[in-house]
Amino acid sequence: MKDSKKLGVNSICVHVGEVKDEQFKGAISPMYMSTSYAFDQVDVKRYPRYFNTPNQEALRRKIAALEHTEDALIFSSGMAAISTTLLAFLKKGDHILIQQVIYGGTYNFIAKEFEKYGIEYSYTASDKFEDFEPLLKPNTKIIYIETPSNPLLGITDIKATADLAKRKGIITMIDNTFASPINQTPADFGIDIMIHSATKYMGGHSDISAGAVATSKEFIELIWETAINLGGNLSDFTVWMLERSLKTLNLRVKEQTKNAQVLAEYLEGNLSIKKVYYPGLKSHPKHTIAASQMHGFGAMMSFELKEGIDAMEFQNSLQFIKPSLSLAGVESTILSPAQTTHALLSEEERLERGISDRLIRFSVGIEEPEDLIADIEQALLKIKKGHV
C-alpha cells in the first residue's frame, strides 16, 4: 500500500490497518476471535493479553497513521490507556506535573493511586503555559496536559509545552480525546505520547468501550511491558468494531465540528445562557492558540445557564438531545459535569475549577443544527412557562 504519510485522511481511515482476507477476498477485515494460537514454528507467539492478535496489530497501524506516530496500542478503556501509560514511566520518587483541569477519572486515579506508589505530583494553577515551568522539579519525569480540556474546553499551548519539556528532558503526554486526531495531531508539535478514550470519537456510535495510546516504537515497547502485566487488552470483537467505526471518523467529526460552531454561536447569543465555552468562538480567551494548533475546533462545548434555570430541569425538558453519560456519538448528548464526570471531586474542588451546578457539557452530533436549536428553544420555553 502507498505510504500512509502520502494518503488523505479518509483513505487512512478506510484502508490503513486493514486485515486482508486472503482466503475469501472479503471487502472488510475478517475477525480473529481465537484466544489460543500456535507457539511452535511461528514468527509471532500471539496472545490477546500481549496486544498482538491479528486484529489488534492491524488497528494499531491505523491509529498510529492518524496520529502521525510510529506505533500505537489499544486498551479496554480510556482509563486503562491512561493508567497503564502513566505507570509505565513513573516510579517511586518521580514527579509529574499535571494541567489543572483534566478529566475527572484521571484526577481521581492520580489522587487515589499515586500515593501508594510514592509518586509525587503537582497541578498547575490554570491551563496557562506560563504556569508550568516554575512547578518543574529535578525529579519531574512527565508533563501531562489535556487540550481541549474536559469540561471547560480550556486550551493549552501544545508547542510551547513540548518545547519546554524537550529543553528539560521531560516526557510529554496529552489526552487528545476531545479533539480527536481529525482536529488535532499533537505529535506534529512535538508531544511524545497521545492518549484517547477511544470510546468517544474513535468509536463514535456509543456502543463500545476502548482506549488508545500512540507514540514512538521505543515508548510503545515500554508501555507494552507494563500493559501485559496490568491486563487492559481489548477483546477482538471490540477491536473489529473499533476498526469499522474509524472508517467514518473523518466524515463524522467534520460534520459534528461544523454543527458545533453553529450551536456555539447560537448559545452565545441566547439570553438564558450566562457563558459559552467553545474554542471556535472569538470570545474564547485562547481562540488564537486553538486556531494555530487545531484543524477544527471540535464538537464539544460547555455552557452555563443563568441563575434561576435548573440544570436538570433543562436537560429533562429536552425532547431530541439526550441527557446521557459519555460523549462523541453521532447523536447529540448533554450532561451535568458536577453530577457525572467530576462527581468524585468535592464541591470546593469543582468550584475551584469553574464547574458549577449550572454548567452543562454538550456533545454535538450529526443532526441538522436547526433541529438541535429548536429543541433547546422548546426546553427553555417550557421551563419559563412552568415558572410563571
Image (spheres, helix red, strand yellow):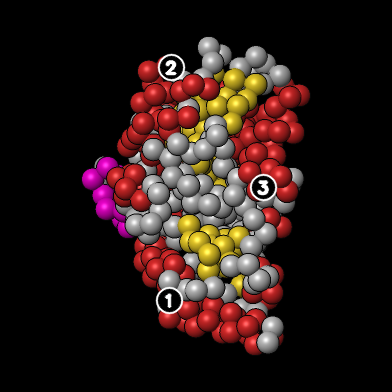
Distance in Å between CA atoms under marks 3 and 2:
33 Å
Please name the residue that numbered disc 3 is placed on: 350
Horizontal side, residue 242 vs residue 249: left or right? right
Please report contact status of discs 2 and 1: CB closer than 8 Å, yes or no: no
Residue at image point 49% right, 33% down: 173
Q: Nearer the viewer, mark 1 or mark 3?
A: 3
Q: Nearer the viewer, mark 3 or mark 2?
A: 3
Residue at image point 48% right, 57% down: 277
Residue at image point 53% right, 12% down: 138
Q: Which sits in the foreground, 129 or 205?
A: 129
Distance in Å between CA atoms under marks 2 and 1:
46 Å
Q: Earlier in the sequence, mark 3 or mark 2?
A: 2
Q: Which amino acid is tagged 2?
A: Gly
Q: Which sits in the foreground, 275 or 235?
A: 275
Judge whether residue 311 can be spotted in this image: yes
Please name the residue that numbered disc 2 is placed on: 169
Q: Which amino acid is tagged 1?
A: Pro
* Spot occupied by residue 276 in the image (x, y as percentages of width and height): 48, 61
SS at mark 2 in the image: loop
Mark 1 Cα shell of 10 Å, populated few (<14), some (14-19), many (≥20): some
Q: Quadrant of the C terminus?
A: bottom right
Quadrant in the rendering for residue 265: bottom left
Query: What's the magenta bit mostly, secondary-structure-wise?
Result: helix
Question: Residue 55's mark?
Answer: none
* Spot occupied by residue 280 in the image (x, y as percentages of width and height): 37, 58
Please name the residue that numbered disc 1 is placed on: 369
Horizontal side, residue 378 vs residue 312: left or right? left
SS at mark 1 in the image: helix
Q: Which residues are magenta?
A: 4-12
Is 105 placed above or below 369 here? Answer: above
